[in-house]
Image (spheres, grey):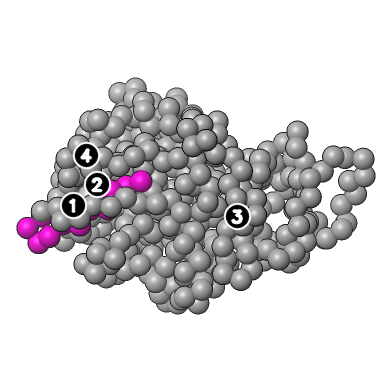
């Protein structure tokens, strides 16, 4: 068992704890204490000097197309699988894999295999059962069974609404999916949430509100993403948080998409925080390895790029550095807020007993300097030290 002592850093749990030493061992945070106060004589401990660093929990990315996504421009536009270092360089240590628009050539069995591979390589990778289209794809034949019986499945999604690529689900169909996920989650002690891809359709979040109003499913069962897609959707998202739902902002983007009216996640987050939205009601996710298609007014594909997992860290840093949002609040939206929503009590927070997932950020500029995931040093002094099997 490797023991690490991360010394004298400014520690954010994400709440500010002051200067602390953090002892890690056996994949866990063992102790957080005043600098120099831990007595470790006789133990083989690797020390990491964090005096010039902010020490924060490993980032939790709630939406990554780990097996690749896309395909909206034909077979050559299918995006590649995510590699281990793509997450590590952005400080992400926990992620949730999902299928995308294509759930025919991309399968849940493949998603599960990739999640297990990333887990073996050193990350924590969970996933959602289901698909964009309704009726959703499952591994066992039922959403409830998938969540109850397969360890990695913690919810369902991303199910697409308000999008020309969705299967135009009805209120009843969405309610049924949410009910299955809810009970599967209850019986397995998992989140059982429904991750909802929201497109640029005029319906925005109406379907989710209609389910909450016409059934016994609470609005908090839904976790809509891409809420910064437009000003109008951002407004609807604000309303959604007031009704008790958590919204997700997407950090992967392109200049063309921003020109078409998307609000950068960093800017949107800073705005929402300034308007008093509780940071626990908002998260950011990368939509990593998604295709980033731009469609013209006729619905024709005009540009296709690929999302990056490290855009999560870039947007976090930009919200603080460029938009002057509160550091702890922004950090909350990529650590403790998604961990709570996804019901991962050992993730997204630093406390004794939590998983040893840590990021050391350089004080000036907030660049990722070092990353520890499940007690293993993955990146040190800006160099990735553990690479994926096929990255060597
Ligand atoms: Zn999506």
Residue 295 lies in the magenta stretch = yes
Residue 276 visible in the current orientation:
no
Q: Is mark 2 within 8 Å of ligand 1?
A: yes
Q: Position of residue 313 (x, y in %)?
A: 49, 59
The crowd level at tag 4 (other Cα within 10 Å; few <14, some 14-19, many 20+) is few
User: Looking at the rendering, which quadrant does residue 103 occupy?
Assistant: top left
Question: Relative to residue 218, is residue 373 drawn left or right?
Answer: right
Give the residue drawn at x 72%, y 36%.
26
Q: Which residue is mark 2?
A: 160
Q: Which residue is mark 3?
A: 382
Q: Which residue is mark 4?
A: 76
Q: Are marks 1 and 2 in contact (CB under 8 Å)?
A: yes
The numbered mark at residue 163 is 1
Rendered view: 147 above or below 273: above
Rendered view: 109 above or below 253: above
Secondary structure beneath label 2: strand
Q: Position of residue 225 (x, y in %)?
A: 34, 54
Question: CA separation, marks 4 and 1?
Answer: 22 Å
Question: Relative to residue 135, is residue 329 drawn left or right?
Answer: right
Rendered view: 118 above or below 254: above
The crowd level at tag 2 (other Cα within 10 Å; few <14, some 14-19, many 20+) is many
């Amino acid at each position: 068992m490797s023991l690490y002592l991360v010394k004298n850093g400014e520690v954010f749990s994400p709440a500010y704890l002051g200067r602390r030493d953090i002892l890690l061992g056996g994949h866990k945070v063992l102790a957080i204490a005043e600098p120099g106060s831990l007595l470790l004589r006789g133990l083989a401990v690797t020390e990491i000097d964090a005096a010039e660093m902010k020490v924060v929990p490993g980032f939790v990315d709630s939406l990554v197309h780990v097996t690749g996504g896309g395909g909206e421009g034909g077979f050559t536009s299918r995006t590649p699988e995510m590699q281990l270092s793509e997450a590590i360089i952005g400080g992400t240590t926990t992620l949730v894999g999902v299928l995308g628009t294509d759930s025919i050539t991309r399968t849940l069995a493949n998603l599960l295999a990739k999640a297990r591979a990333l887990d073996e390589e050193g990350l924590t990778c969970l996933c959602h059962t289901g698909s964009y289209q309704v009726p959703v794809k499952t591994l066992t034949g039922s959403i409830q069974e998938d969540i109850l019986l397969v360890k990695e499945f913690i919810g369902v999604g991303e199910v697409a609404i308000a999008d020309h690529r969705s299967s135009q689900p009805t209120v009843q169909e969405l309610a049924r999916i949410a009910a299955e996920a809810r009970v599967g989650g209850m019986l397995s002690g998992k989140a059982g949430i429904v991750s909802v891809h929201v497109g640029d359709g005029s319906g925005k979040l109406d379907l989710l509100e209609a389910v909450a109003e016409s059934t016994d499913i609470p609005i908090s069962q839904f976790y809509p993403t891409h809420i910064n897609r437009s000003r109008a959707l951002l407004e609807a998202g604000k309303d959604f948080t007031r009704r008790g739902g958590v919204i997700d902002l997407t950090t992967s983007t392109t200049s063309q998409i921003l020109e078409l009216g998307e609000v950068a996640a960093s800017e949107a987050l800073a705005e929402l925080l300034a308007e008093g939205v509780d940071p626990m009601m908002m998260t950011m996710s990368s939509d990593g390895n998604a295709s980033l298609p731009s469609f013209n007014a006729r619905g024709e594909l005009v540009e296709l790029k690929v999302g990056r997992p490290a855009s999560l860290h870039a947007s976090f840093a930009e919200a603080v550095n460029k938009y002057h949002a509160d550091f702890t609040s922004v950090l909350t939206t990529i650590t403790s807020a998604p961990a709570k929503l996804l019901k991962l009590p050992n993730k997204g927070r630093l406390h004794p007993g939590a998983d040893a997932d840590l990021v050391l950020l350089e004080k000036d500029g907030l660049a990722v300097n070092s990353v520890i995931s499940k007690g293993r040093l993955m990146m040190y002094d800006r160099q990735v030290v553990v690479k994926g099997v096929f990255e060597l």
